[in-house]
Amino acid sequence: MKHRIIDFTRIDGVPCPCGTSRRGLMEEPAFPGTIHRTDIDQTAKPHYHKTLTEVYYVISCEPGAVMQLDGEQIPLHGDMAFYIPPGTVHCLVGKAKTCIFVLPKYDPEDEYVCGS
């Protein structure tokens, strides 16, 4: 595999249950996952995945932001990361900039919004 540069400023943002996501390495078959630069907003919805594992890295967040993991609320600050295995209901509440590592490769069919 030749090296790749992922310039998130050149990737179109798409709506997701958390806000707006720019998904890198979606089209790279040699890499087993994807990396997302996601802007979390006030419309974030609790959701889970049946097969995907995610690691949320919080770049920055507004005061009072929290991560909800299976009902537990964890206060946030920049430079925190969360390992989220399949089946974990999660939602970042408040505005934040995140980098999300997804394994295996992101599949929109494996995103289940709670209460929908």
Image: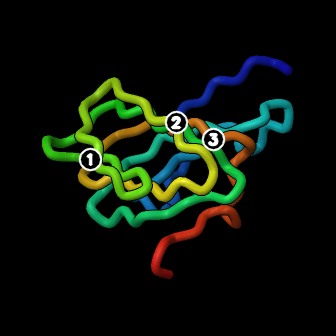
Image quadrant of residue 79? Answer: top left
Q: Which mark is residue 83?
A: 2
- Check disc 1 and report its element: helix, strand or loop: strand
Q: Taking 76 as reference, is 32 left or right?
A: right
Most extreme residue toward the bottom, as rendered?
Answer: 116
**40 vs 81: above or below:** below
| Nearer-N-terminus badge (3/2) | 2
Q: Residues within 10 Å of mark 3 (few under 14, many from 20)?
A: many
Q: Taking 102 as reference, is 67 left or right?
A: left
Q: Amino acid at mark 1?
A: Val
Q: Amino acid at mark 3?
A: Val
> Can you say which quadrant of the picture contains the N terminus?
top right
**73 vs 98: above or below:** below
Between the residue at mark 3 and the residue at mark 1, the CA separation in whole angstroms equals 20 Å
Between the residue at mark 2 and the residue at mark 1, the CA separation in whole angstroms equals 15 Å
In contact (CB < 8 Å): disc 3 and disc 1: no
Give the residue number, with chain letter if any, for mark 1: 66
Q: Residue at 37% of width from left, 48% of height from top?
A: 39
**16 vs 38: above or below:** below
Q: Taking 90 as reference, is 97 left or right?
A: left
Front disc: 3 or 1: 1
Front disc: 3 or 2: 2
Spot occupied by residue 29 in the image (x, y as percentages of width and height) = 85, 38
> Would you say residue 10 is visible in this rendering?
no
| Nearer-N-terminus badge (2/1) | 1
Q: Amino acid at mark 2?
A: Tyr
Give the residue number, with chain letter if any, for mark 3: 102
Most extreme residue toward the top, as rendered?
Answer: 3
